[in-house]
Amino acid sequence: MVGPSAPSAVPSASDEKQQVKAAINPSDRTGGGQVRPANLEVPPQLERLATGLTRLRAALGSVSYPLELPSADEARQVGSALAAQLDDYLLPRLSRLDAPLLVVVGGSTGAGKSTLVNSLVQTPVSTAGVLRPTTRSPVLVVHPDDLPFFAPGSGGVLPGLTRTGQSSSAPDAIQVIAAPTVGPGLALLDAPDIDSVVDHNRKLAAQLLAAADLWLFVTTAARYADAVPWETLTTARLRGTVIALVLDRVPPDAVGDIAAHLGEMLTANELGSAPLFVLPETALDERGLLPDAAIGPMRVWFAQLAEDANARFTVVRQTLNGALAALTPAADGLADAIEDQVRTARSLDERVEAAYRTARRITEDGLRDGQLLRGEVMARWQEFVGTGDLVRGLESRVGHLRDRVIAAVGGRPTPSHNLRVAMESQLVTLMRGVAADAAEQAYSAWHAHPAGEALLHPDLQHASADLPQRADRLVRDWQQWVLNLVRTEAGDKRVVARGAAYAVNGAGLAVMIAVFTTTAFIPTGLEVAAGAGSAVAGQKVLEAIFGDQAIRSLATRARAELLTRVEELLAAEAARFTGLTAAVHPEAARGTLLRQAAAEVEKAREELALTGSGS
Amino acid sequence: MNVAQTVPNDRIDTGELTRRLEALARFLRVTDPYLPDGDLVAAHTLVERASGRLTLSLDHTVVALAGSTGSGKSSLFNALARFKLSPVGVRRPTTGAAHAVVWGPLEPANRLLDWVGVLPRQRFVRESALDGDDEASMRGLILLDLPDFDSIERGHQLEVDRLLGLVDQIVWVVDPQKYGDRVLHQAYLSHFATHSGVTIVVLNQADRLSPTDTEVVIADLNRLLGEDGLTGAPVIASSAKQPGMLQDLRSALENTVANRQAALRRLAADLDVIGDELGAMFGPPAAEDEVDRATVRQLSESLSASAGVAGVADATAGAYRHRASAATGWPLMRGLRRLRPDPLRRLHLAEPVKTDSVSTDVVPRTSVPEADAAQKSAVGLSVRAVADRAAAPLPEVWAPALNAAARSRAGDLPDALDRAVAQTDLGLEQPPSWWRAVGILQWVLLGAAGAGLVWLILGYALAALGLPEIDGAQVGSVPLPTLLLLTGLAGGLLLWLLLRPIIEAGARRAGRRAEQRLRSAITEVGRVHVVAPVREVLNAYAQAREALGVVRSE
């Protein structure tokens, strides 16, 4: 009844699978005896493959997925699994193709993995029990001759796990036991479960499975339809790992029924060619081992595999080839995820830019149509012109002095000062308003995007806290710049510079006013009289000093300068958002690197032809 | 706090439960427009389900056997029913659809099963005349055999998830092989942590373990349940194969049936869960003066600026000056004054608008200039400040609702402001009576001067013609006509000069008065258009908070 009963339903179509079948079915072996794989020629392509893998490993280490996208979570897992597989299996395995065949016994909790391993080596090496999960630290059983292959620092598989002599509760420890009952060239690894509540077990099991040359998947009559193990099986199949199955704990009267059903399921999942062992539920002997009648055929199977170096080597190469072949699609998937990240980052940035573009446009419009000068500013300009300060200041130094004396005695600021305060406060209010709107717009635009939402923090809902101060500073700096500009421009027009200080002051003010009024000032309502009159007055006064063309160019330059400064301010505001996606942009190059490295590995693999007829 | 958890024998009052459910429904009505839908889905589902369950028979208890594939749910089901009703098999997964068995007459249970959604062909009646009174203690029990939740058949899991939401009591069937499975604990048991009052955990297939092992496993299972948060749920070892090992489970079920409390307890536990979830969205009670004076003043400042209040007030002062000069100026100069326009007329504010309720006049748009970019920004900032101020003491989740409320009528603001300006009585309709008196006095003085002039001209003419002079009246040494002329002219001029500061003061007062009235009208606009919608949300918050207090039976 029992034994390697590969479901005969579907004869495997692919050459590869037939070869595997041949390889792991020792009865088919062709003789070849004790040729150690170490004696096989190592082709030069192997060198290139190793280089490619190292580069791929480096590329894998450098990429990250900062944005919370559906693809990112998966990519992080796949990425770390790939890196672990490279470290734990591919690189060590390539460097030591002659290392023993690592059989990882994996499966659900309570499936009887430990009992199976103990029975196979006929020694209770791994603790079996009724508590779930039982095995927490993996147990590796090897032939004493093969011990050096698994010694720490030997460059063997799973270099990240600490080797211990006895059972250890430390995480990432692996208990290595030498047992002569294991054939040389074989190593049995009792892995933790894949589906218990202990998360660490699951991760460790996945890591061990990725390092397996042959995966002995153990399931039970109660479990064989569970979703979790089938997911793992599918992963292993896609990765090209050679799989053998054990159906354990089968009620003796249901053996035929369940084995047939499992066979159907295997075939439906393209695993029809995997050998299947059925172990009926039996009482254990006094050492806690399965009786010989049940375990015998499996022991024979493993003994034959241990004897046949070629079969072993074929299994090793089959799994290695599968793992290498699976690298490229996986790496491509990661590169796709990176592109997804970059694309999303761009679209998020685009949303922010749109919000701040609107802010810039509103500011520009506010400055262009001169509306800022309405109301208060206009009234004060009228004050300024109406009292004749400017004119007198230009006309005579005496008048200038008198005004200063009056201002000092009266203790009130000069009209020009009033005018400036008004303009400052209006400009600052405008900037605060547009920045607050833009921040809110950008915030809600990101909020609507899952990846954007993950990046947001409550501060971003509002403009930055020190914006009023910075806007204030900006306006005063700009005013200083305008005054300097006027001073420079007026330098070679000394004819009118008798009241120099005041004139420059007044001219600077007038230029500021002209910024708003020259272009598209449309007088309406309140300031029909005030606006039109004062605009003309301001223009005329300045024209008298510098000439018409000079005023125009001064006004244009002052306005352009103000806009540049506002743009800088808004860019700094936008950077609060775009800074959060900045980490994504360098990933694009790393993604390309990843793709290249994977392509290189794939090319080397094809040249090497691990399972091809040539090797 | 948790009614179900305290003492399992604590009876739950139907009235109390109904009151809590009604409070939850009220809560949902109030918060629906303001809170994100995603946060309320569970509560909506519960209200719907609870009202469904409470209208159906409370004398029946729906108990579900749930567990992994191969744990022996169907065997247990059949063993409890003492008939082979649900197919048992070795192929996994075995049971694809829920089976139900009813102890007692089928009819009243049928509606309940319709509601739960068990197909009629999968319903069985347990009781028959042959049993006598053996099964009387189980009467009222509806036992469901659920599909598994961990096999490769995804549909089974969906069916289990649906049914677990509807049943009154859950019996989790685990077995020695699978009791530590991740999917069982993480996806199911830990989600029912607050339902320990309606949960029984059964370690099935206990016959496969030695009695010592059974104890060890049950201890480990209890530890895992503790990690899931399910402390207090009874853990029973059982076996479908050995009838003796079924007794504990059977008496637990009989107990449940006799109590007739499972349905209420289940709903109470659900309410506890929902109450705790929703509680996270509530903080301290919203203060009475949520939107403080300073914020409202800032709002009305910026609204006034954007409505051009200062300009209108200046125009009012100007109009006062203009009209006063026109009424009281030196009559010969008044015509000149009329050449200049009335500042209020230029803003289309000269005509008073009828504001009584019977008037059908449309309030005309004024010519007050539109707000500029800076003023619009200032309004935006102060509206935002109102929302932020109101949102400050509330949990984050309410901020968007308050923000949206503050801005809900922002589009109407410019028109409302303009309308408020147009409708405000600026106080210039009734010209002061002294204008008229002064006007008459001016005319009298002018008349006197005119009379004096005519007299003088007449006197000169008579002298020139050699006619006898009119016997000139003399005031002191000055002839009367000369005095009349000079006094008339000087008096008019003097009056004009004297009145100038008075008119100026009057104009300033009129400007101030107009500004005051405009500001109070604008403040009212701010209250209606910005503050009121915010208050509405705060009101909803307070009501929802109160309702939630009832739900959580605090």
Image (cartoon, grey):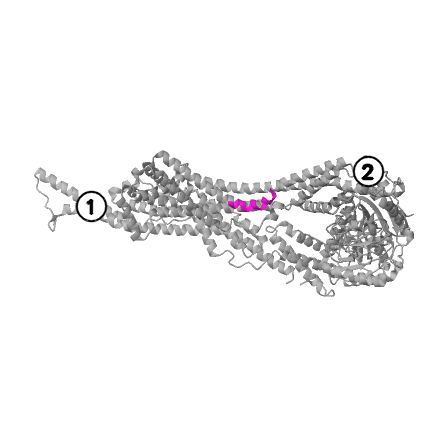
- Residues at marks 2 and 1, CA–CA distance in whole angstroms: 127 Å
Residue found at the very far top of the displayed protein: A549
Q: Is residue A340 visible?
A: yes
Give the SS element for disc 2: helix
- Label of residue B489 in the image: 1
Q: Position of residue A114 (x, y in %)?
A: 82, 54
Q: Position of residue B166 (x, y in %)?
A: 74, 54
Q: Is residue B421 visible?
A: no
Mark 2 surroundings within 10 Å by alpha-carbon count, few (fewer than 14), some (14 through 19), many (20 or more)? few
Q: Which image quarter: residue A561? A: top left
Q: Is residue B251 magenta?
A: no
- Name the subunit of mark 2: A
Q: Position of residue B110 (x, y in %)?
A: 79, 53
Residue B331 vs residue B357: left or right? Answer: left
Residue A364 vs residue B551: left or right? Answer: left
Q: Which image quarter: residue A166? A: bottom right
- Name the subunit of mark 1: B
Residue B410 vs residue B67: left or right? Answer: left
Q: Is residue A577 magenta?
A: yes
Q: Which residues are magenta?
A: A572-585
Q: Nearer the viewer, residue B41 or A277?
A: A277
- Label of residue A16 in the image: 2
